[in-house]
Amino acid sequence: MTRVLITIDTELSAGLHQQGVSLTDNIAASIDARTAQGDYGVGWMIDRFDAHGLTGVFFVDPMPALVYGPGFLADIVGAIVARGHEVELHIHTEWLAWAKRSPVAAGVRPNIGDYRLDDQRALLDLARGLLINAGAPPPSAFRAGNFGANDDTLRALAQLGIAYDSSFNAAMADTVCAIDLPADAIEPVARQGLVVAPVASLRDIGDGMRPAQICALSAREMRELLRHAARERLSAQVIVTHSFELLDRRRTRPNRLTIRRFEAMCAEIARNPALKSCGFRDFGAAAIVAEASGAAPLAADRLRSLARMAEQLGSNLVYERGLAGG
Ligand SMILES: [Zn+2]
């Protein structure tokens, strides 16, 4: 049985805030993914999860509460918790730029991993407190914004008693993701006093790794990754999306391609008896590490990759450059 964790980074856009967009409009665009054709954000995703009998793990960034106060955060957290899905901790340190008071002397850095260990612990403790005060159960898992974590992040989390980190993304290991794991790490593993649950990934043509993210894999690639995991009896697979990922880049229109991929992923997890959707609270850290299969990631497939590139190109023409009008 392979556990599948569908994780949703749930966050306001610091970019929109910087452009002067109001809190209300930022929530509509980034959390509810509101468009003239309907909402495709957190509420819509939970509807789809419930229809398929799946669990969503929402990594919520509480840092904008330092700018706006805690009220909006309680609304976001409350809506997820009330519907029985999981709220876990996410952090985007760039919000410190607008905080009335900085909790650390080091000031604003783009990633949590850019801070010293004691500052990381202070920021993570602060963020955890904001989330709990907003009505979330004490978080058991964490993901760094931009996957910008390092081994000190793991140490700080362990000191705070957080059992899981999900900040390792092999596709970003050459850039901001500095957690010391091999690129082919695709199952949960014990590190620095906690369990790192890497983002699932497959091998792409050209020797790179490609993450199991809705906007990064075609529906076919996601299905084959999940079937490979089930066949090889991987202990767990972490899939990534964002609260706004089913919209176009300007966050004004639904993106039919990513919506179709999201639906196809839900259907595959629901129908495959060797896959079990769950949250981080649904299994034990020691057990999940012991169940690791050690299997390699899904191998690259030239035709599969080319098909995705063609699909993506078509979608970009429609949704990113506005050639379809409207
Ligand atoms: Zn994020």
Image: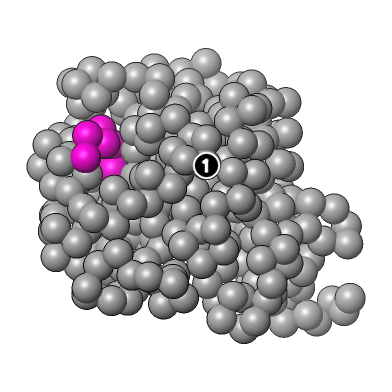
Q: Is residue 163 magenta?
A: yes
Identify the secondary structure beneath mark 1. loop
Using the image as rendered, state which of residue 209 and residue 190 is in the foreground: 190
Disc 1: which residue: 134
Q: Which residue is drawn at 61% across and 75% down?
A: 16
Using the image as rendered, state which of residue 156 and residue 262 is in the foreground: 156
Name which quarter of the figure residue 12 lies in.
bottom right
Name which quarter of the figure residue 256 lies in.
bottom right
Magenta residues span 160-166
What number of labels is visible? 1
Residue 274 locus on image (x, y percent): 46, 18
Residue 273 shows in the view: yes
Residue 194 locus on image (x, y percent): 18, 36
Residue 91 locus on image (x, y percent): 39, 57
Q: Which residue is drawn at 65% across and 27% down?
A: 83
The N terminus, quarter of image: top left
Residue 228 shows in the view: no
- Please state if 60 lies on the left or on the right of 150 as rendered: right
- Please state if 55 lies on the left or on the right of 177 as rendered: right
- Vertical side of 228 occupied by 101: above or below: below
Using the image as rendered, state which of residue 231 and residue 209 is in the foreground: 209
Residue 136 locus on image (x, y percent): 49, 35
Q: Which residue is drawn at 72% across and 26% down?
A: 51
Name which quarter of the figure residue 185 lies in.
top left
The C terminus, quarter of image: bottom right
- Please state if 249 lies on the left or on the right of 167 as rendered: right
Label 1, residues with CA under 10 Å away: few <14, some 14-19, many ≥20? many
- Please state if 74 lies on the left or on the right of 61 as rendered: right
- Vertical side of 73 occupied by 48: above or below: above
Q: Does the magenta stretch include residue 326?
A: no
